């Protein structure tokens, strides 16, 4: 499984992906958009678990996740 940490802000977000062994797979600072989020997640061809660190900007991420993981 891939584990992703999302540090979410209004204009940018930092995403860090590691595997079950703790190996860093990718780290990127991206614009805070559904397209950027989708591109980051699409590089992994296996199950993904994510956690979001944020204050008030998380709602769209939850909606995006739910629409891509029915």
Image (tube, rainbow, N blue to C red):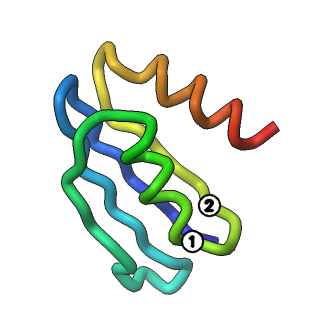
Counting from the top left corner in percent of width and height, residue 29 is at 19, 54
- Judge left or right: residue 31 versus residue 34: left
Label 2 CA crowd tier, 10 Å (few <14, some 14–19, many 20+): some
Asked if marks 1 and 2 touch (Cβ < 8 Å), the reply is yes
Q: Residue furthest front?
A: 35
Q: Secondary structure at mark 2?
A: strand
- Judge left or right: residue 56 versus residue 51: left
Q: Quadrant of the N terminus?
A: bottom right
Q: Which residue is mark 2?
A: 48
Does residue 18 sit above or below 5 in this rendering?
below
Q: Residue furthest right?
A: 70
Label 1 CA crowd tier, 10 Å (few <14, some 14–19, many 20+): few
Closer-to-camera residue (46/55): 46
Does residue 21 sit above or below 17 in this rendering?
below
Q: Quadrant of the C terminus?
A: top right
Q: Quadrant of residue 39?
A: bottom left
Residue sitting at 50 percent across and 85 percent down? 21
C-alpha distance separating marks 1 and 2: 8 Å
Counting from the top left corner in percent of width and height, residue 15 is at 32, 55
Counting from the top left corner in percent of width and height, residue 33 is at 35, 34
Mark 1 or mark 2: which is in front? 1
Residue sitting at 27 percent across and 42 percent down? 7
Does residue 30 sit above or below 2 in this rendering?
above
Residue 60 badge? none
Closer-to-camera residue (7/22): 7
Q: Secondary structure at mark 1?
A: loop
Residue sitting at 65 percent across and 74 percent down? 45
Closer-to-camera residue (8/22): 8
Q: Which residue is mark 1?
A: 44
């Amino acid at each position: 499984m891939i584990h992703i940490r999302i540090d979410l802000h209004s204009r940018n977000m930092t995403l860090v992906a590691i595997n079950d062994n703790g190996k860093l797979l990718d780290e990127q600072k991206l614009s805070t958009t559904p397209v950027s989020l989708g591109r980051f997640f699409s590089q992994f061809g296996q199950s993904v678990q994510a956690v979001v660190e944020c204050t008030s900007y998380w709602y769209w991420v939850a909606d995006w996740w739910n629409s891509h993981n029915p």
